[in-house]
Amino acid sequence: MNKLNLHKLWITTEELVETTSIPKSSLYRYVREWKKQGNDPKDMGRIKLRDTISYRWDPRVFVGWLIRCKLEEPIKYDYEFTENENLKQILVFNNLPLNKQQLRKEQNL
């Protein structure tokens, strides 16, 4: 797995999946669930640039969204526990902040 490239502002879905090691099916499920709740995928870091075929992602926004909306959510089912543990391993491997103070500092910059 690659380290999260924070030097690139927008990355493709394929790059996001490769960099984070989150399965593409899980990413699409996250987007589908988020939209079903009435939210905008832009909050996850996904945008559609004019004259492009595929979506682009801001990896910093996506990681912040993962921490807020997936890791801090109450766990209801066993598979959610396993998914949360896998996400924590991905974030630790990429040297990303897991605590709220570090996340807030980055969002306020």
Image: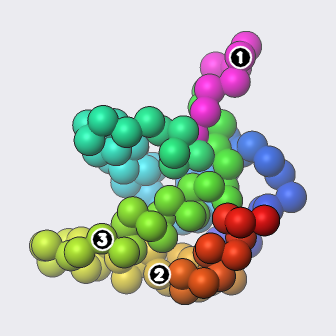
Give amino acid for label 1: Arg
Viewer-side residue, 38 vs 79: 38
Residue 94 visible, this angle: no
Between disc 2 and disc 3, the foreground one is: 3
The crowd level at tag 2 (other Cα within 10 Å; few <14, some 14-19, many 20+) is some
Rendered view: 40 above or below 67: above
Residue holding disc 2 = 88
Viewer-side residue, 41 vs 7: 41
- State the image coordinates of residue 109 (x, y, percent, origin top left): 78, 65
Residue at (57% x, 56% y) in the render: 62
Which numbered disc covers residue 50? 1
Question: CA–CA distance between discs 2 and 3?
Answer: 13 Å
- Asked which colour scheme the image uses, the reply is rainbow
- Total numbered badges shown on the rendered structure: 3
Give amino acid for label 3: Glu
Relative placement, left or right, of 45 versus 27 is: right
* Circle nearer the N terminus (3, 1): 1
Which numbered disc covers residue 73? 3
Residue at (36% x, 75% y) in the render: 72
* Circle nearer the N terminus (2, 3): 3
Residue 30 visible, this angle: yes
- State the image coordinates of residue 2 (x, y, percent, origin top left): 71, 69
**SS of the residue under disc 3:** loop
* Circle nearer the N terminus (1, 2): 1
